Amino acid sequence: MVLRMSRLLLKTLRDDPADAETASHRLLVRAGYVRRSSAGMWSWLPLGKRVLDNVSRIVREEMDAIGGQEVLLPALLPRETYDATGRAAEYGDLLFALTDRKGTDYVLGPTHEESFTLLVKDQVTSYRDLPVILYQIQTKYRDEARPRSGVLRGREFQMKDAYSFDTAPEGLAEAYRLHREAYVRIFERLGLDFRIVSAVSGAMGGSASEEFLAPAAAGEDTFADCPECDYAANTEAVTFTAAVPAAVDPGPVEELDTPGTATVEALAAAVGVPAAAILKNLLVKVDGEITAVGVPGDREVDLDKLAEHLAPATVELVTAEDFALRPDLVRGYVGPQGLSTLGVRYLADPRVAAGTAWTTGANKPGRHAAGVVCGRDFTVDRYLDVVTVQAGDPCPRCGAGLRLDRAIEIGHIFQLGRKYTDAFRLDVLGPDGKPVRVTMGSYGIGVSRAVAALAEQTADAHGLCWPAEVAPADVHVVAAGKGEAAALAARAAGALDAAGLRVLLDDRDGVSVGAKFTDAELIGVPRVLVAGRRAAEGVVELRDRRAATREELPLEDAVALLR
Ligand code: ATP
Ligand code: MG
Ligand code: MG
Ligand code: MG
């Protein structure tokens, strides 16, 4: 199909939008790909929609290749399902909430773990129906505190969200591996430069998670990267590697009375904070010293990962013999850094037989109390100075100085385990006829954000510069003049179209040749074919947008070269 610029809904702009801080924001607006509708809400214009569709197509192809089944769920969802998992509280102000005419509360989905769990509960009854991978490419809503950088951080945006369901942990590990490999293929095909880094699961919950980051100055994430080995982690996930156990005077400590059982939820309710704000401090012995290590409250403790993070120190469990831990004891403290609530419990996992303390916000930089329970007495045992990892800090794996870089989070994969299937009691009948609790993974790609990330990584001083697979056209044909030039350009467009290429034809009247060239550079189609100076001879000029090379050749040869 030939897209004619004389009829295209496209108005390129000479000037940058006043509020644009990043290259992708400036250029996608100036080149007429997107248009701001309201804060954090964007309209996709014809050229932008084509790029967005190309990204979606690649994502779809690779998701289908790992056996993913595409579905489409509503974006408007009953709030009660998000209350049931605690995520309404965890997301807090990030959730767009509304009420229907009957007074029922709804949210606009920020991500769909709840709905997919319920869908599978409704549809799947036997282990024979599993494993299953479901995905959708859908509009998501998050009332971001700082919507910025155009489509990089929208309040309404496109996400590919996938969910895997299995009966056994090995099945989850396999689904996770399949997604990880599919993501590598997707981002390679998109032409993105990316890194896979260890991440924290946050409000999503679950145990293991990794992010796909596209290095770019405009990114809002910082990751630590080892120049010597393959260690890479979001700095959010490595704060505790720099935690310094400090035997310092804690200052005044005031006890709070928070009775109840020592669950994260009970603690949260006792101190009036969302459950996700509660951080477990796992009590372990690091080189023989009892130490607390912060992990998010809704996350299972992965000791192997912990040992890896803290290497070369040896990590051992604090045993019940070390402290006579009581499962029913909860105490709260107000330390010098504000509220720091601690509790203990026995964990079912025999590897974590001893105990866990919880604090609020303990992975935030600052001083945090950690303690142990002995008999019924709780003693604040030590304080931790948690510091953010700095460039040059030793790599936890090999000791080399870490580099810090900025990046855009383009994908995030989670081994959720049973957080959601427990909440909705999703069981299937196992081979022995007994119910088995299902285990789950979730896997996101920021489809609209990937468009901006690509623009960030590939744009140059003249404008956008798309990789071939996502470009809005394969060839941009410029009619550099009227008469013979215009006629040759039309012939070129027809021949390229017949050869199966997607063609953008600049056939606009009343636009100078110079302005057409400027627009071609701004729009960023990788190959530009110009019909102008030597049109009478049937000779065209072929330009490579990225390499900025040009050669003159007969039209037929140009078509043969491009096809
Ligand atoms: P961020 O840290 O940038 O806020 P997130 O960790 O909250 O992202 P996830 O919940 O992991 O995001 O969602 C999966 C993917 O959706 C992200 O990896 C990202 O690519 C995309 N995404 C998240 N929020 C936005 C947004 N506001 N605008 C565009 N894409 C987004
Ligand atoms: Mg976010
Ligand atoms: Mg994130
Ligand atoms: Mg994320």
Image (cartoon, rainbow, N blue to C red):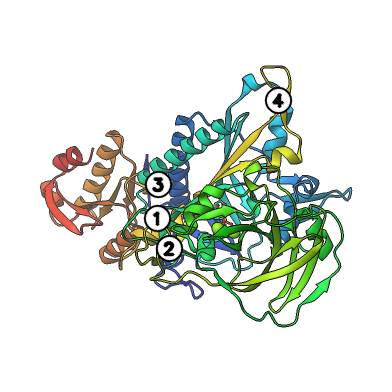
Q: Quadrant of residue 433?
A: top right
Q: Residues within 10 Å of mark 1 (few under 14, many from 20)?
A: some
* CA distance for labels 4 and 2: 41 Å
Mark in front: 3 vs 2: 2
Q: Amino acid at mark 4?
A: Val
Label 3 close to label 2 by CB (< 8 Å): no
Judging depth in this view, the residue of 234 and 249 nearest the camera is: 249
Say which element carries label 3: helix
Query: Considering only order in the chain, which callout, 4 or 1, is on the residue closer to the N terminus?
Result: 1
Q: Which residue is mark 4?
A: 428
Q: Quadrant of the N terminus?
A: top left
Q: Which residue is mark 3?
A: 187
Query: Considering only order in the chain, which callout, 3 or 4, is on the residue closer to the N terminus?
Result: 3
In the displayed structure image, the side of residue 84 where residue 530 appears, left or right: left
Can residue 30 be seen by looking at this rendering? Answer: yes
Judging depth in this view, the residue of 559 and 294 nearest the camera is: 294
The correct choice, above or below, for 529 with respect to 362 in the image is above
* CA distance for labels 4 and 3: 35 Å
Judging depth in this view, the residue of 217 and 287 nearest the camera is: 287
Q: Which residue is mark 1?
A: 231
* CA distance for labels 1 and 3: 20 Å
Say which element carries label 2: strand
* CA distance for labels 2 and 1: 8 Å
Mark in front: 1 vs 3: 1
Residue pushed farthest right?
Answer: 102
Q: Amino acid at mark 1?
A: Tyr
In the displayed structure image, the side of residue 528 where residue 447 appears, left or right: right
Label 2 close to label 1 by CB (< 8 Å): yes
